């Protein structure tokens, strides 16, 4: 009797759970990203002119059908909200008009809602007692529901249905097309009169809408934005500016349309105008700083903080490159943002949005952002995403478009099966202070290509496509076997930069060698050799972007050279801080002087002073100092290999899908606390280490491991550095 | 001195001509068609519910760059109008803001305008003394204009530029997105009170917006539309209806939103409402009736007139199927509209628009309208278009998308290289009053496929793509050789309907046999045999749609059986007229009775009573009675083979790109007048014929020909029937 009662209670609770399920706005997967991304990529202006991307912009599917199979214990009223013109079919019968409410009888039913919307994304929000629009709904862009002469409906089994996609629009009145980033008012820290106007300083790099308070009179106002004081005052050369006419009999606050990046603004207004002060509305994507890092070295702490702020400024509708100029989504930049993000916000949705936007829709007509290397980073980023988040569903949704992207690449390979820049391909590699040959087969590109083929094989396996898995494994293996014969130079003990018409060049650059180490394409011996012959060899062209420093320092970390990396970090990022940076830059050459630091692209202020790829210490400190990374998807297994890298102590948190991993380490103690999964703490100790719980295993001379359970309990280990 | 003066005058006049060149709104080719087509296809409603297509709707490119190379003798001011957000670059330099006026200095310049528009098609209108936006401008959807670190622009030679497209938007304020069909007020011919309302008769099938004059009071108005009286009065089953609330203190005219097709409307309004009368705004695409046909038989004349009206009603933003129900663009219907159009309006632009819309954009995810046969008609229609108009430029613009469409088809062929319906393919053939097997290899589909491959080879030749030409010729030849072995049945002396797993079926239908004759795939002897064994064989399933009667009667005409066709035409189209048709129907089975004629798709009024494919007499009378057709593209050469088909006399005009061909014929005289090209009049005469000008050549027994010059001079021939 009691058991029956409990069973009924359980059923009732389950039913209650069904009731409590929240409806959300849903759409065709990838489409909202394309629409929102187009809006965002179109925010770029260059000195008052609209400046959209030079690559193809896609469009969402303008006609989409949503469907859901229902089985109702009792009849239920639903409300329907739609962005677009729509119809509703219940069990194949079209209902009159565009119903906003509908009662569905008990029993099994098919509910279909078909929406057309050219201007914004077709989206629906359906809510009832047990029915709610969510990712369990199906969507298609061609339902193939024709009828024959007798009125018999077609067999639509060939229709390609996808699971609907959503984000966080949980309110029927908060439609997806209304999306806006958050804003909050911020004050300036100083305002200094200049010859023709006033220079306003907001104290640090920021982003948003300038507000001119109590603006009165008639005339023209010009707003010159500067990431540096010099830029704001350079009315002829500042990268962004706004200009507008005012005719206010009464004083009122005026907020400039169009958000901008700046620390300084120089306001020049006609004589007939007056205002009280200049403030701003700071615009941002709300994020929780789940990752953290603190250590005894305040410069490193400051580097981490400024890197985190740089990340936040560039984490917006999507992960963008820099906030001043491009404000675009670039694949090579984005993959680094994703990796940093896994150690800071663990905001998976923004990663997914950005990956979707970068891929766009078929047919593929150029490389991602037109850049060959950026196509490869895109592939690599997909598997990274899976490894960190464990979101297999995402891979399933994306796989067909991964495949068509790779088909585009394979169609452009040469008879060696290697990629070479063809007309229209941008072979980027890096912004370098020296000549980089982009001709022929670049070793760097083949290595990224090979990794991309491996990624395809891994993802084919995930979606259970055995023939693709075999095909891509074969292609990857074949290419991998060609790398050393094609590019390894015995005398130089390094991969050379490129090969033209089958002839190895004499030039060695860091790129292919770094990635050879990182991807394990070079064996241990060769990796160690490359450290000397390339990475620590000052005669090899230096890297002057944080972008490639990311991989350079990462490969040094992978080789256990954290102490060297600490010095490099302090010199390079510390160098920017010493120049007054409040966010990290697109490029930094310590040898430049004064305002030369701000120049790029042949323009005196062309350089971005807040660039996502500037924030890599976030990633390096999380992955190679705290030493935390996923071993199996979604941190179901992790590893912790902490390394002080010359620091006295450090402490920090790495976010995981269902919690955090927290580390403390000094020269004699390590403390680890994990909330999910399990994984080994791997560390070195000159004496026998001791653990508060668990059994430490010895792995080799001075090397130990201890299995950490993700149970939220801290484990303390005493060891000798 | 005088000659110099004349030369200067000539130059001045040329310059004046340059000045006089009219600017027009331009866009990316095919994009306006997609946008306008989506709007049009979305006009379908079914009993008050929005009813969009079940196939993929494409979207225009949302970001497009327009460019023009200029060489100005003197500086010139231009005005710029744009649909969308835009920027302007002169010689690679981005101008401030979004300039609407711009002065371009003398000399050589590059002018670029880049436009983003999600909701409507990116389009520009540029006008100056000599500069005007037109088809000579280039457009691209990805300009690939990246710059390197030093500010050097990329080599954009890989960018795919297309010639811009335009229509007839010659006024900068008349933007393409504002396009509306014309309307004019029309009165009803009768209004008859009914039990609950009033039945209004407009005297004939028509199309437009119902207007309720001097509507006053509060309540609901329902408008039930009918192509027949029975439909309008059937409030439960009429196909279209409108319902709206009124609350008018003062009487005012109310025009119902959303155009509809009807002859009758039944207006039911609440007691509290009053109005004076019901009228309408007739909506139409302005067309000139360039083709004409008159003869001694008034029933044939009436058939031609009603067919012409049917054509006009279905010639709208595009050629649509029927005006009541689908209002969609269907490829199989459209190819017939095109052919009729060449003998009525010669409106090439509407043909081009419709072909573009039907093709849409890559990737191809289904057959055209999801129907296998409709894909093949699409290919065939492209070469027809070229033959009638001579517009090679159109083929060049379209060829890449012809190729990708054919690739889709080829990927779906079986190991025999034949097409079979796969899941999701609609194998249509025809609406038949009997069982049509759609399984396996249908002979009909292979014949259309073969013709499509031949079309591809012809078009590959036109765009000078030799490898494609060879490929498609090979495929066509190979398939053609398989047709008789696969489908010809010696006993039945006919192509059988289909073959399943290599086994010929026993069933013979008319379809493949008709097309075998029409395309010349059957030799002369077999064609004659088929006439008896199939076309004139009453035991073979009869055709009850004007759609397939089009080809049936055409193949009889091609076999010289005009007299039989005259009888058929009078029986079939005359039969509809006798039932009161004021436009021709989607389907007509003389054996049906009363309002059974209006039923289809399991619905009592499902049938369209104004269907484009009902208008085929226009084509038959023009091509096979007046006997005019192009022999070389654009009527540079034509042929005239008039045939009275049992009529006493006939007279008519066939439009050509640069004029008309006019024919008069009775039993003893033929008169021909042509405005362009040249071509042979071919005719039979039992006595020696005489011509007013030119030299008649004898071709065979009783067969003669005379070369007609397209000089606008009438040539009269006396002959004996």
Image: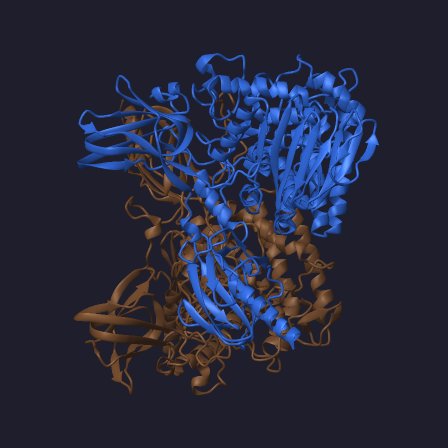
Chain colours: A brown, B blue
Task: Tell me the quadrant of the picture where the C terminus of chain B can be found.
Answer: top right
Residue at position x 28%, y 22% from top?
A: B198
Which of B286 and B247 lies nearest the eye of the viewer? Answer: B286
The answer to whether one can see residue A304 in this image is yes
Total marks shown come to 0
| Picture coordinates of residue B624, whole percent (x, y) | 67, 30
Which of A441 and A276 lies nearest the eye of the viewer? Answer: A276
| Picture coordinates of residue B509, whole percent (x, y) | 67, 20
> In this image, A72 relative to B352: left or right?
left
The answer to whether one can see residue A719 in this image is no
| Picture coordinates of residue B266, whole percent (x, y) | 32, 24
> In this image, B483 relative to B267: left or right?
right
Residue B253 lies in what quarter of the image? top left
> In this image, A207 relative to A412: left or right?
left
Looking at the picture, does residue B482 appear above or below residue A239? Answer: above
Residue at position x 73%, y 16% from top?
A: B533
Looking at the picture, does residue B303 appear above or below residue B147? Answer: above
Task: Tell me the quadrant of the picture where the N terminus of chain B can be found.
Answer: bottom right
Looking at the picture, does residue A392 appear above or below residue B230? Answer: below
Looking at the picture, does residue B543 appear above or below residue A454? Answer: above
Residue B247 lies in what quarter of the image? top left
| Picture coordinates of residue B97, whole percent (x, y) | 39, 69
> In this image, A189 relative to B391: left or right?
left
């Amino acid at each position: 009797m009691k058991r029956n009662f409990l069973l009924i209670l359980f059923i009732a609770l389950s039913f209650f759970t069904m009731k409590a399920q929240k409806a959300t706005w849903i759409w065709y997967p990838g489409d909202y990203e394309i629409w929102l991304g187009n809006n965002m990529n179109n925010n770029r202006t260059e000195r008052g002119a609209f400046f959209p991307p030079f690559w193809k912009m896609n469009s969402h599917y303008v006609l989409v059908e949503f469907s859901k199979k229902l089985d109702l214990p009792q009849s239920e009223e639903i409300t329907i909200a739609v962005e677009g013109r729509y119809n509703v079919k219940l069990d194949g019968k079209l209902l009159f008009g565009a119903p906003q409410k509908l009662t569905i009888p008990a029993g099994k039913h098919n509910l279909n809602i078909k929406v057309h919307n050219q201007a914004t994304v077709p989206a629906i929000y359906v809510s009832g007692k047990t029915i709610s629009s969510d990712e369990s709904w199906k969507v298609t862009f061609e339902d193939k529901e024709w009828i024959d002469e007798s009125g018999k409906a077609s067999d639509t089994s060939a229709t390609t249905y996808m699971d609907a996609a959503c984000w966080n629009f949980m309110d029927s009145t908060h439609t997806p097309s209304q999306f806006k980033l958050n804003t909050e008012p911020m004050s300036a820290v100083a305002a200094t009169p200049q010859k023709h106007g006033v220079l306003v300083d907001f104290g640090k790099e920021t982003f948003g809408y300038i507000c001119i308070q109590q603006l009165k009179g008639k005339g023209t106002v010009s707003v010159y934005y500067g990431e540096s004081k010099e830029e704001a005052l350079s009315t002829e050369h500042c990268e962004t500016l706004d200009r507008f006419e005012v005719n206010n009999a009464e004083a009122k606050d005026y907020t400039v349309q169009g958000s901008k990046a700046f620390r300084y603004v120089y306001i020049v207004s006609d004589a007939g105008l007056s205002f009280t002060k200049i403030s701003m509305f700071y615009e941002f994507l709300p994020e929780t700083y789940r990752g953290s890092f603190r250590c005894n070295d305040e410069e490193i702490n400051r580097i981490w903080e400024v890197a985190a702020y740089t990340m936040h400024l560039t984490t917006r509708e999507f992960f963008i490159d820099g906030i001043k100029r491009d404000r675009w989504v670039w694949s090579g930049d984005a993959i680094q943002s994703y990796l940093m993000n896994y150690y800071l916000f663990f905001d998976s949705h923004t990663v997914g949005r950005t990956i979707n936007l970068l891929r766009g829709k078929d047919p593929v007509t150029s490389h991602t952002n037109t850049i060959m290397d950026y196509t490869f980073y895109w592939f690599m980023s997909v598997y990274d995403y899976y490894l960190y988040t464990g979101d297999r569903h995402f891979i399933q949704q994306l796989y067909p478009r991964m495949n068509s992207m790779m088909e585009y690449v394979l169609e452009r390979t040469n008879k060696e099966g290697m990629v070479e820049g063809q007309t229209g391909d941008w072979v980027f590699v890096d912004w370098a202070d020296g000549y980089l040959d982009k001709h022929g087969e670049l070793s760097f590109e083949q290595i990224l290509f090979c990794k991309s083929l491996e990624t395809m094989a891994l993802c084919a396996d995930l979606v259970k496509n055995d023939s693709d898995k075999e095909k891509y494994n074969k292609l990857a293996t074949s290419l991998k076997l060609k790398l050393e014969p094609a590019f390894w130079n015995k005398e130089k003990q390094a991969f050379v930069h490129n090969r033209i018409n089958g002839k190895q060049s004499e030039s060695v650059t860091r790129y292919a060698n770094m990635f050879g180490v990182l991807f394990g394409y070079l064996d241990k011996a060769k990796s160690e050799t490359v450290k000397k012959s390339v990475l620590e060899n000052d005669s090899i062209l230096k890297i002057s972007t944080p972008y490639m420093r990311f991989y350079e320092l990462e490969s040094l970390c992978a080789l256990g050279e954290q102490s060297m990396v600490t010095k490099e970090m302090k010199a390079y990022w510390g160098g920017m801080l010493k120049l007054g940076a409040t966010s990290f830059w697109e490029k930094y050459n310590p040898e430049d002087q004064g305002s030369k630091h701000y120049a790029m692209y042949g323009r005196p202020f062309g350089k971005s002073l807040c660039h996502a790829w500037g924030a890599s210490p976030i990633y390096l400190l999380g992955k190679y100092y705290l030493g935390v990374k996923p071993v199996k998807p979604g941190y179901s297994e992790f590893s912790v290999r902490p390394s002080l890298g010359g620091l006295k102590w450090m402490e920090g948190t790495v976010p995981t899908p269902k919690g955090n991993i927290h580390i403390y380490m000094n020269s004699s103690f390590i403390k680890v606390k994990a909330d999910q999964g399990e994984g080994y703490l791997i560390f070195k100790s000159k004496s026998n280490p001791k653990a508060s719980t668990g059994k430490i295993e010895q792995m080799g001379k001075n090397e130990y491991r201890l299995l950490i359970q993700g149970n939220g309990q801290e484990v303390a280990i005493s060891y000798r550095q």
